Amino acid sequence: MSHQSPPSTEPSKQSASNQSRGGLDGIIAGQTRLSTVGKSGFGLTYLGYSIEDLAEHGTFEEVAYLLLVGRLPNSIELQAFKDRLAAGRSIPKPLRKTLERIPSTAHPMDVLRTVASMLGTLEPEGAFENAIKVSQRLLACMPTALTYWHRFHREGKPREFDLDEPSIASHFLATLKNRKPTEIETRAMDVSLILYAEHEWNASTFTARVIASTLSDFYSAITGGIGALRGPLHGGANEAAMELLDQMTDPDSAEASLLTMLSKKMKVMGFGHRVYKGADPRSDIIKPWAKRLCEATGNEQLYAISERIETVMRREKGMFPNVDFYSASLYRSLEIPTPLFTPIFVLSRISGWSAHILEQRADNRLIRPLADYTGPEPRPWSPISQR
């Protein structure tokens, strides 16, 4: 497979006032052909395809292929791609031993960060021509590694997993739950992976591109992306949303509790977005899936509480739910432990990070911004006896 060359990633010129703003807020740092986020007339698209069409008609494997190759696969290409992913699901013995030694108290995001880094020592990328192979290997084996660690510490013994499930979604659920997932469970999980796959130059993607721009290896860039997503200002909103929902017993008490939180100016995770101003299109897609799963699993009260919280946030703050909010009730209905919510983000976003690494390498320029100096004026050295 070949990756199509992107336009130049030469940063656009910005005004001096814009350049002095902290956090690069509103600064165009480069160009990408991979996605549009909140742009008028586009919404969220992956390589020109709307997220609505991708979630309704596509599979995560088709979306991953689209991001990595630049076009949708035909049936033969898709089956070959899925076969390669299935063949790459097993994890090497040294990595298993490492997973067994990672404490059960470790954060699952730290586990995935370690997996990406160690796999880079066991199966180094070598030449950049191996990048697609590495990206497929990570997509394939990260779910296995995560569920291996989780179940080893829960059950106290090594596990051998059935690696023959037809998709990444069904493979993850089967290895996590030790049973074949239902059709609705698999499709809901698949849609979730599609929605998290790519999102332009967010913090973790930017981190991966900065590392790639130094001509570092693929694993280093992915490890850096995981590290950036580990921070609560980027990942973790779905976990925080679930922790909030767990405190609520019914819609009425949820509304009362939420109004108290708002009166105290407490932050409610899962609402609003740095880029989207009116709505997160991914939320409109995941919400009906959360409803279907909640109804199918006897979690109607959880969904009712979620809807009431959304209503209150819109009424009181004019804020809309982002993709993380209803993902929480969806994952709970799939019987996924809350600490694994953000790692699911990783299992999906590896496809987007990989595509951005390939795009950066195709027309590379070192990403090295400037900073406004705010330190002291030049001063003479003082001997230690005079300090």
Image: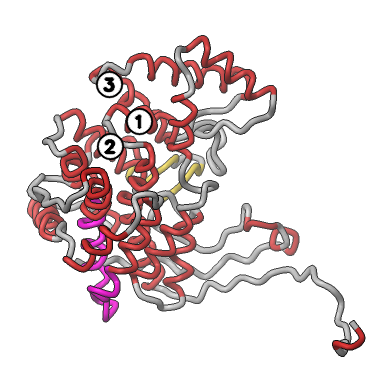
Query: Can you identify the residue that label 1 sits on?
Result: 286
Disc 2 vs disc 1: Cβ atoms closer than 8 Å?
yes
Horizontally, residue 210 falls left or right of residue 26, namely left
* SS at circle 2: helix
Residue 227, given in percent of the width and then of the height, sits at 45, 59
Q: Quadrant of the N terminus?
A: bottom left
Residue at 23 percent of width and 73 percent of height: 123
Q: Is residue 123 a member of the stretch shown in magenta? A: yes
User: Alpha-carbon neighbours of circle 3 within 10 Å: few (<14), some, or many (≥20)?
Assistant: some
Name the image quarter holding residue 194.
top left
Residue 290, given in percent of the width and then of the height, sits at 33, 25
Horizontally, residue 279 falls left or right of residue 179, namely right
Marks 3 and 1, the one that precedes in the sequence:
1
Residue 206, given in percent of the width and then of the height, sits at 48, 61
Q: Could you say which disc has been placed on residue 292 in the image? A: 3
291 vs 169: above or below: above
240 vs 216: above or below: above
Residue 107, given in percent of the width and then of the height, sits at 40, 50
Between residue 65 and residue 312, name the one nearer to us: 312
* SS at circle 1: helix
Disc 3 vs disc 2: Cβ atoms closer than 8 Å?
no
Residue 47 visible in the snapshot = no
User: Alpha-carbon neighbours of circle 2 within 10 Å: few (<14), some, or many (≥20)?
Assistant: many
Residue at 29 percent of width and 60 percent of height: 101
Magenta highlight range:
119-143
